[in-house]
Amino acid sequence: MQFQQLLYFVAVAETRHFTRAAERVHVSQPSLSQQIRALEKELGAELFSRARGNVALTDAGEALLPLARRILADTETARVEVQELVQLRRGRVRLGAPPSLCTGLLPDVLRAFHDLHPGIELLIEESGSHDLVRELARGALDLALVVMPLPAASPALTTVELLHEDLVVVSSAAAPAPRRPVRIADLEGEPLVMFRHGYDLRELTVAACRAEGFEPSFTVEGGEMDAVLGFVRAGLGVAVVPSMVAARARDLRVTALARPGLRRTIAIAHRSDVAPPRAARELQRVLFSAGTAGGATGPAA
Amino acid sequence: MQFQQLLYFVAVAETRHFTRAAERVHVSQPSLSQQIRALEKELGAELFSRARGNVALTDAGEALLPLARRILADTETARVEVQELVQLRRGRVRLGAPPSLCTGLLPDVLRAFHDLHPGIELLIEESGSHDLVRELARGALDLALVVMPLPAASPALTTVELLHEDLVVVSSAAAPAPRRPVRIADLEGEPLVMFRHGYDLRELTVAACRAEGFEPSFTVEGGEMDAVLGFVRAGLGVAVVPSMVAARARDLRVTALARPGLRRTIAIAHRSDVAPPRAARELQRVLFSAGTAGGATGPAA
DNA sequence: ATCGTGCGATAGGCAGAGGCTATGGAGATC
DNA sequence: GATCTCCATAGCCTCTGCCTATCGCACGAT
């Protein structure tokens, strides 16, 4: 049994006419007759009574017709469904990202992506890089934005650098302006508002201070991104955040760090062994065009 | 898209293994790979992610799988349904027959047929030959038992003689026994119980009397078969009926007609231009074996 | 590090299936 | 009775699907 045979069969059933059915399916009449015969032979039953000038379904033909129609409709559905995935009219991307990027980069990028492909479902997992790497490996995520370098002993992931973010110091607009530009060493003794454990920014900042030979002092610690910014706004201290996040908090004073400053590298990661779904690759593309077009520094040359 | 490709696709999806899938569907592994590739190319999307040692469905594959399963299940159903018709496990016969045969021949034959093929639906249309011929031509009946010869101007029907029935005279067991054997001429003046118009038996009997030069006289006329027998039983007169019917009315006196007597020829008719359904052909076969095995005379040599 | 092993992809050849054109033959039509 | 319509048949060609043989690659064991 073959799809063409069913197609021809339905055409004959509907036209009650071999020659016209052949025209409809764009084959010669003998080819159509031959295929109908082959189908009848395989099923072991005549499907049409070929009375002169009056082709009619036999009982076997009547039994086959609805199933043939359904099979053909299903094949069409299959084609359409796959096409919708291919053409990004439907689909799903499971994207992991650290909180700082969810606040800074993602809103605009996801908005742009959604405008391009409104049929694609976007699932965001907001976690530290460590968790994201694990979820990627499990197959629970298609893509993740991660802070480089990845934790040691990472599973086989492919990473592509997306952008470098400069870190800046934010402080309350009401407080006295700090010296500009701020050096890391200037943060010694400075009251800091610090993220909870798990933020890459925390590890990065603390490591930088230790490299300068001091332990940073926290007035408040443990909050998420929004809370940290709120504490800073309330004058509880200053915080080190990505420039992209600082740019969005317009009522805070933003001070750059003195060279060489602090920067972190954001990369897009996915499993090396399986190609991400079409929609995920498209999101990756949009992320890159946004990354290079936006204010942050693009990937290293 | 082809059925085999879907079959191979489902096999790979279920085994997650090209080589084992190829074994399962009894083709070589390259052939299977090639067909999967062809399917992927036609659909324009990868269906499997071929990670080393871990073949997995892509999103397109996930979308296709349920439809592929359903399509394959439908083809199997189609095969089975047609087979059931072919093997007479299912089906329908629309049989027309005159009342005398519905009373005489059919009960036993239909019982035998039903025992052979309990899944076949039997629809009986009880009418005069004239109506039956019309219904056959319309396609409302598959087969009809008709009294020969057919009415003039019959549409293109194929008839096969089934049996010759002798007509006999039945009379009340309580009434005085008629002379034996009765001649047609003896019916002159004899009170007759006569069927309603439309019975072939009526036309046949009246024609026979007229051929002898007299008009038959009816005490009661217009009843169906059962009513006529009842009137005879009640002593209202005698009636001319087929021997097969008379044999079933055991409380009536049955008297043969003197040679050459009266007989009628029963034939099986169907449209010449379309072959009857399988079940109808089978009923035809059973009718013949019953006709030759039963008490009546078989078809003319 | 090297080799063996398992697995999917690739190459090349063969046979069959399905398509086409041309033609046959049986009813219907004028 | 000539013609027309329409489905079946015949013969040929191409393309496809299957096969065997082999490659390439990653992984595991030695």
Image: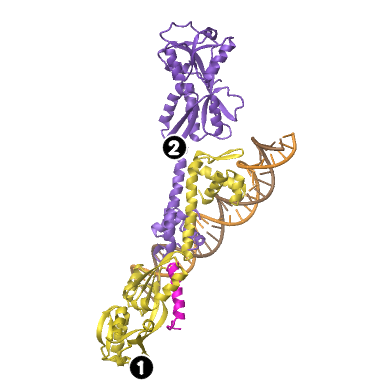
Chain colours: A yellow, B purple, C brown, D orange
- Which is nearer the eye, B152 or D17? B152
Q: Which residues are magenta?
A: A275-301
Which residue is nearer to you in this view: A11 or B282?
Answer: A11
Could one spot residue B50 in this view of the protein? yes
In the rendered view, does B80 fall on the left or right side of A51? Answer: left
| Foreground: disc 1 or disc 2 | 1
Q: Is residue B158 magenta?
A: no
- Where is residue A236 drawn, in percent x and y? 27, 86
Q: Quadrant of residue A17?
A: top right
The secondary element bearing badge 1 is classed as loop
Q: Is residue A158 above or below residue B168?
A: below
Q: Amino acid at mark 2?
A: Arg
Q: Magenta includes A293?
A: yes
* Element on which disc 2 rests: loop
Give the side of residue A182 with respect to residue A284, left or right: left
Residue C25 image offset from top left, x and y in percent: 66, 37
Chain identifier of the residue bearing label 2 in the image: B
Question: Is residue B30 shown to the viewer in this render?
Answer: no
Residue beneath disc 1: A180
Density class for disc 2 (Cα within 10 Å; few <14, some 14-19, many ≥20) is some
Residue located farthest toward the bottom when viewing the structure as drawn:
A179
Residue A209 position within the rendered picture, expressed as x and y whole percent measured from the top left = 29, 88
Q: Is residue A295 above or below residue B79?
A: below
Point out residue B49 in the picture as x, y percentages from the top left corner.
42, 65
**B6 vs B152: above or below:** below
Residue at the front extreme of this rendering: A174
Quarter where residue A38 is shown: top right
Q: Which residue is mark 2?
A: B90
